[in-house]
Image (spheres, rainbow, N blue to C red):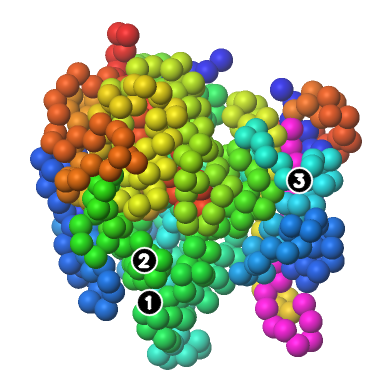
Amino acid sequence: MKRRVVVTGIGIITAHGVGKEINWGKIKSGISGIKTITSFDSSKYPGKCGGEAREFSATSVKNVKRTRLDRASHLLIHAVREALSETENDYPAYKNREILLSVGTTLGGMLSGEMYHREVIQKGLKRARLSLVTDYLAHYQAINVLKEFELAGDFTVFSNACASGTNAIGHAFNSLRYGEYDVAVCGGYDTMSEFTFAGFNSLMAVTPTLCRPFDKNRDGLVLGEGAGILILEELEYAIRRNARIVCEIVGYGESSDAYHMTSPDPSGRHASYAIIKALQDAGNPKIDYINAHGTGTKYNDEAESKAITMALGDSAKEIPVSSIKPMVGHILGGAGAVEAIVSIFSIIHKAMPPNINYDCPDPQCNLNIITKAVEDDVKTVLSNSFGFWGSNAAILFREYPWEG
Amino acid sequence: MTPVITGLSKLVSCDLDKGISHMNEQIRHMRFVHDLEKLVVIAVGLVLYDAGMTSPVGKEDIGLYVGVDNAIEDIKSEYFNNILSEGILGASPLLFPFTSPNALTAQATIAFDIRGESITLPIQRSSKDVIEYATDCIIGRYTKMAIAGGITTDRSQTSCSETIKAPVYTAEFFFLEDRKSAMERGVKVYHRVMDGSI
């Protein structure tokens, strides 16, 4: 029998800042956190801007060596701390309990890897400091979280491109539903690195102007960095410990395009399977808002529009849709998690954030794109994530308690 | 629901030519960017063959679950060293997508038209985790069948031949499905899977 799973804690860091209040305030207001990149020289690239988390430098740690942590670990640990702080009174109980840590990332500790490679080029292999790569591989950051918070249990790391964060939450959701765990810490993270920036620029996928999801004149994405973390608990367990329940997760679906390395299947057919699976998983509820993957690239937005229309039929044209990527950038492995959190905010605060920079409707993206924040009785939200290599994931959040 | 193994494959990067001779015309003529990619595609092809599946699969009910150890770092190194030595022009748009570990999984989905879930776990003990994950997906009915396995790197052995120095990679895959499905298909059953263990 499937158990019910609820969200009881949230932690978020983006270009807008650190924490829930500042992020929701700016996202709802349609403020852009995109600026010229400062962490490396971006002047030589066609696209020069990004969503760096400038207000965040490092977090305090007590159980791991601070000097050896990559920025990715700092982001992740800080977001986990914020999420756990909501369960502060009961947090010690987690220490004696097996929990699941499920996170998504595409880059892991890439900034450390960059530094190491630079030293190899400049000083030679024998003189490059190996200590630089102690937090490089994509699973080390999860291990640092387990150590820092003295959590017992297991961890899983997903590296499924831009769907990684949603995959990580979906895996945690399923693990709790089937009784493997009562509590999970899940989400995603990624940093701003020249490695990725150069790659997306070489693919000519980065906008030299503004990121405009679903706009007819859209010309590319903008990268971002950050982390998003959710604490999930099995409903009865959360009620027993009198936890503050934020919302419920009710459906999750994945699929694969099997089409191309960087382009989505233009028909949107296989992306729609992920949405359909999530909807069926949740018993086909009425959707009040869609937080789109909406990268601002020509092919993604068109394929996503078709996928949404295929999955939701005629109602697709009515449901408000927006993408937050023009405001915080594309956080890659963290995107799904941060967008899941914004989806939850829209349920809690009964408002949907705007799709900024949208001026010219594209007939190929025939959706109800909202350009200003809309206040409404948002109960159920769909959040989409579609990654490189055709990795598709969709997840559904619903208000709690549900009186439908 | 009783997940069982109905297909096995194990391929070492030194034996790529031997492995590809078992593939159909389409796979034999595929252009590969990196040996790792070729290794995964052929190993997945071999497990499909062993499990009695026709190729291309063209189904949404088969998922592909791949664990990658630090093998992917070799592609990242190649890509990033090019940027450092040649500047911005060194960023290869062809190699960049392969720096994401799910590139290997996805190439196999494209090669064999596998349209179910495709999941990549980039951790050291990934094969065990991946088999456990795939088993859970079958039990939870998220997928009817699963191809689960991983790639490991042997850096102690850095050459397949006298002339070419390169790390040796090994790909191992299992084809998993419910025992009832295996009986309906009339295929051999190697083992039963319990809690991710065989």
Residue visible at 14% across and 34% down? A373
Q: Amino acid at mark 3?
A: Ser
Chain letter of mark 2 equals A
Q: Badge 2: how crowded within 10 Å, few (<14), some, or many (20+)?
A: some
Question: Is B128 on the left or on the right of A209, as rendered?
Answer: right
Q: What kind of element bears circle 2?
A: loop
Q: What kind of element bears circle 3?
A: loop
Residue labelled with disc 2: A204
The verdict on a common chain for dots 2 and 3 is no
**Image location of residue A108, percent across then percent down:** 43, 59
Chain letter of mark 1 equals A
Q: CA distance from mark 3 to mark 1?
A: 44 Å
**Image location of residue A285, percent across then percent down:** 39, 17
| Name of the residue lying farthest toward the bottom | A123
Question: Is A288 on the left or on the right of B169, as rendered?
Answer: left
State whether residue A235 is above or below residue A388.
above
Residue visible at 84% across and 63% down? B21
Q: Amino acid at mark 1?
A: Met
Residue labelled with disc 1: A115
Question: Is A79 on the left or on the right of B118, as rendered?
Answer: left
Q: Which one is earlier in the sequence, the residue at label 2 or at label 1?
A: 1
Give the residues drawn in magenta, as a range. B160-177
Residue labelled with disc 3: B55
